[in-house]
Image (cartoon, helix red, strand yellow):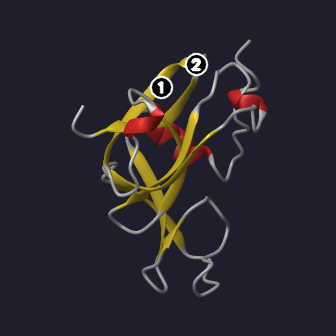
């Protein structure tokens, strides 16, 4: 059992479409030049509604993390003790993720991360995961 796939809305579709291309795309406000994540119809910085999607570098640093001893949502119900994290992109946006290819004892806040595009968990949906950049 893989749990429920993420809910894709018209507002979030560009995010998911970019992941399917193995890219990251984030909204940018044309009024104040602020970055907007999670997908929204307005800018949380200035309230502007002129937003466009821009492809950004997926490399990140680990902002925070935790090992989930029990599933925190249906999306993680199939995983045993996933490492959940928040990756900070170079543009300052922080995205929730899960870490792969690393043991909990080797995880460090500030570690460099490389995106991993997971096309296997759900048919037709690509998930963004991260792994240590040095491994």
Q: Is residue 95 left or right of residue 107?
A: right
Numbered badge on residue 89: none
Depicted 27 relative to depicted 97: above or below:
below
State yes or no: discs 1 and 2 in contact (Cβ < 8 Å): yes
Left or right position of 50 against 73? left
Image: 114 above or below 29:
above
- Give coordinates of residue 18: x percent, y percent: 45, 41
Q: Where, quadrant-wise, is the N terminus in this rendering?
A: top right
Crowd around label 1: few <14 · some 14–19 · many ≥20 (10 Å) = some
Q: Is residue 130 visible?
A: no
Along the line of sight, which residue is nearer the eye, 46 or 73?
A: 73
- Across and down, in percent, residue 133 comes to 26, 40
Residue at 77 percent of width and 36 percent of height: 73
Q: What number is the disc on residue 121?
A: 2
Q: Identify the residue shown where x is 60% and y is 83%.
A: 48
Q: Residues within 10 Å of mark 2 (few under 14, many from 20)?
A: some
Task: Give the residue number, with chain letter if any, for mark 1.
Answer: 118
């Amino acid at each position: 059992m893989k749990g429920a796939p993420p809910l894709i809305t018209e507002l979030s579709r560009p995010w998911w479409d970019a992941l399917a291309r193995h890219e990251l795309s984030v909204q940018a406000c044309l009024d104040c030049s602020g970055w907007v994540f999670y997908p929204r119809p307005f800018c949380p910085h200035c309230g502007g509604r002129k937003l466009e999607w821009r492809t950004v570098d997926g490399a990140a640093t680990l902002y925070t993390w935790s090992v989930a001893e029990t599933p925190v949502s249906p999306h993680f119900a199939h995983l045993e003790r996933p490492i959940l994290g928040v990756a900070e992109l170079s543009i300052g946006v922080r995205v929730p993720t899960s870490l792969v290819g690393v043991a909990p004892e080797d995880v460090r806040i500030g570690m460099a991360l490389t995106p991993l595009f997971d096309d296997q968990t759900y048919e037709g949906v690509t998930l963004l995961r991260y792994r240590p950049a040095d491994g």
